[in-house]
Amino acid sequence: SARPYVIDEMISAKAIAARIEALAREITEAFGDTDKLVVVGLLRGSFVFIADLVRELDLPVEVDFIEVSSYGDATESSREVRILKDLRGEIAGRDVLVVEDIVDTGHTLKHVVGYLGAKGPKRLRTIALLDKPTRREVDVKADWTGFEIPDRFVVGYGIDYAQRNRNLPHIGAVRFTG
Ligand code: PRP
Ligand code: MG
Ligand code: MN
């Protein structure tokens, strides 16, 4: 995008780290009896969150990824979720935690839960760092949420605007200046 913008800090790296510590304790407790937890990140947005989250889990963990796409380079959801890259491992009969960066319209998470649920996991749970409940178009909610945020276009900590700003260490809100 050629439109100029600045990024206002919305959630600091420190606040994110503290929240992840608390979430990881809850997840460790919820899956305390597991033989192995398969943590599935949704590429690409969740790559930073999953890296920080798994390092706080006191459980036997396997990490896998799927890639779906709805937004591409657009700011609006296409509402048509496609599987671009499937899991490498099996999840039938396994405990699975789906890790998402943000739930917006909900189409992505809803589709992924349906898709992975059909593979027959033992338990299938979801976590999203961010949730924009006012934007929801389909009925879905992550089992764990880091922060509920207002309807601002956010970037950083893995989240992009037209593939930029994923490497920002905090969550910022995009503000157009032109
Ligand atoms: C973004 C974001 C979530 C999804 C949320 O992914 O990372 O996965 O959109 O939107 P929804 O709730 O309206 O479906 P995107 O499709 O942009 O791919 P990316 O993760 O590779 O950036
Ligand atoms: Mg995504
Ligand atoms: Mn994106």
Image: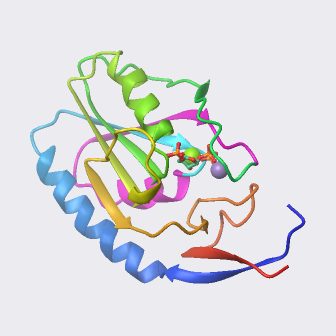
- Magenta range: 46-73
> Is 160 rendered above or below residue 106?
below
* Left or right: residue 57 compared with residue 99: left
Q: Does the image show residue 169?
A: no
* Left or right: residue 145 compared with residue 155: left
Q: Does the image show residue 84?
A: yes
Residue 59 appears at what percent x and percent y? 22, 47
> In the picture, residue 131 is in which quadrant?
bottom left
Which of the pair 23/76 is nearer the observer? 76
Residue 73 appears at what percent x and percent y? 76, 48
Which of the pair 155/15 is nearer the observer? 155
Is residue 53 within the magenta segment?
yes
Q: Could you tell me which quadrant the C terminus lies in?
A: bottom right
> Is 104 rendered above or below residue 122?
below
Residue 81 appears at what percent x and percent y? 58, 30
> In the picture, residue 144 is in which quadrant?
bottom left
Is residue 135 within the magenta segment?
no
Residue appearing at x 34%, y 50% in the figure: 127
Q: Could you tell me which quadrant the N terminus lies in?
A: bottom right
* Left or right: residue 154 compared with residue 7: left
